[in-house]
Image: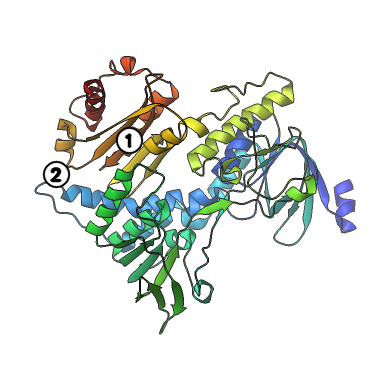
Amino acid sequence: MADEQEAERGLPSESQYDVVVIGAGPVGENAAGYAVQGGLSAAIVEAELLGGECSYWACIPSKALLRTPQAVVDARRLPGVTAEYDPQEVLARRTYFTGDWDDAGQVDWAEGAGIAVLRGRGRLAGERTVEVTAPDGSTTVLRARHAVVLATGSVPVTPPVPGLDTVRTWGSRDATSAKEVPPRLGVLGGGVVGCEMATAFARLGSQVTLFNRGDRLLPSTEPVAGERVAAGLREAGVDVRLDQGIDSVAPAAGDAITLTAGGGTIEVDELLVATGRRPSTHDVGLDTVGIEPRELAVDESCAVAGAEGWLYAVGDVNGRALLTHQGKYQARIAGNAIVARASGAAVHTGTWGEHAATADHRAVPQVVFTDPEVAAVGLSSAQASDAGITARTVEIDIAVAGSSLHADGYAGRAVMVVDTDRDVLVGVTFVGQDVSELVHAATIAIVGEVPLSRLWHAVPAFPTISEVWLRLLETYREG
């Protein structure tokens, strides 16, 4: 009755929940889901599609674009195999996996799990208070008894290239949701998005030119990863320009775009700007609770510093590890911590504790779905050195019976970084065809801090690519 009277007077309606989550991507869904599983009530607020960036514009559609062409290329590496694919069918399969950008299924899941769903833009409006502005302009105020969780993700960073604002450009969303394959595609940026989309569109038929200001691709990985991915892109027909950014951009005849770089010009039909992302903290109302709208400082349970234990930030928004699976991991940690604190139970935030996102620092896995694939977890050799770890690095070819059978002319590399003081792995990188499925074994070894003397007894099955583990350990022992 009170809500109806407030609505009649033009005042915002108000509801109470134990937990209110702003942002309904995979990270926000996990935070709300774990709160509900722990016996708390939860509401989730989303301005776009439930399922978020990963489901509709990032991980899922990008991998759908990459999968069919890669499967065909891999098959052709075996003698006697002929295979083809239809680019339009690849685009159609991508659209299938996004549900044609309809989130009805995600809404059904959330509501079926007991999570209240509110459509609109949510922002903080004071301690434990969220104001939701619906698409029709109406406003609802949500009060959180225990916690508010920010899961607002990240947004693209646009570089200061002269003329960039005078032309139509693609962001990652435009690339992964494209309805047609452009004849000529320019890609600015040699990180994961730039490399994966250059691979995808070259395979779909675009003439691709990739510009990277640095001297190697994938700069946060082991050097061999960037080197081999650059070689793979060139083999796929991509013009890879290292140490060369774009100096200026201008409209060209028709809908084309002129790029000036390295003293020359080229024309493209679309320009993908893939120069990184930053946490989306600029318009979530942090000022209303006395917190600067910048990268948020959080503790190991992902509680925001200075918010007295009621405000949490999970996923890209806290800047710790901008990967969907790490965000979901943080959401599980935060959801369990909220439940524990709400019940007065002990909260364990020590290293590898139940309420500590320790893996963010020590065991972040990532796969780059280029050709070759890059699968890595933990620290690179350079990162281990920067962290002051006494480390030894072993790098070998992936040349075992399993890889030889897997593809003719199989070429891959494996890199293992060992903390010699503790005799445990701190980083592993694989580069090669189908190495993505190797990374979880490395993740378990790092998280479990398995001594190399014990890892020696983990016998790889024959004949598999995993035999490389034995070769790595043998090389380490011989050294």
- Is residue 315 among what the camera can see? yes
- Is residue 39 among what the camera can see? no
Pointer 1 with pointer 2, Cβ within 8 A: no
- At 40% from the left and 78% from the top, the residue drawn is 256
Other-residue count near label 2 (Cα within 10 Å), few / some / many at <14 / 14–19 / ≥20: few
Q: Quadrant of residue 88?
A: bottom left
Query: Which one is in front, 376 or 386?
Result: 386
On screen, residue 214 versus residue 336, left or right, reads left
- At 19% from the left and 43% from the top, the residue drawn is 411
Q: Quadrant of residue 38?
A: top right
Query: Which one is in front, 130 or 92?
Result: 130
Comes first in the chain, label 1 or label 2: 2
Decide: is 72 above or below 159: above
Mark carried by residue 409? 2
Q: Position of residue 96 (x, y in %)?
A: 42, 54
Q: Position of residue 185 (x, y in %)?
A: 36, 68
Label 2 is placed on what type of residue?
Gly
Query: Which one is in front, 130 or 167?
Result: 167
On screen, residue 308 versus residue 356, left or right, reads right
Pointer 1: what residue?
437
On screen, residue 102 versus residue 403, left or right, reads right
Decide: is 434 above or below 474: below
Which mark lies nearer to you, 1 or 2? Answer: 2
Decide: is 463 above or below 216: above
The residue sitting at the left extreme is 80
Q: Position of residue 150 (x, y in %)?
A: 66, 43
On screen, residue 11 versus residue 234, left or right, reads right
Other-residue count near label 1 (Cα within 10 Å), few / some / many at <14 / 14–19 / ≥20: few
The C terminus: image quadrant: top left
Between the residue at mark 1 and the residue at mark 2, the CA separation in whole angstroms equals 20 Å
Secondary structure type for disc 1:
helix
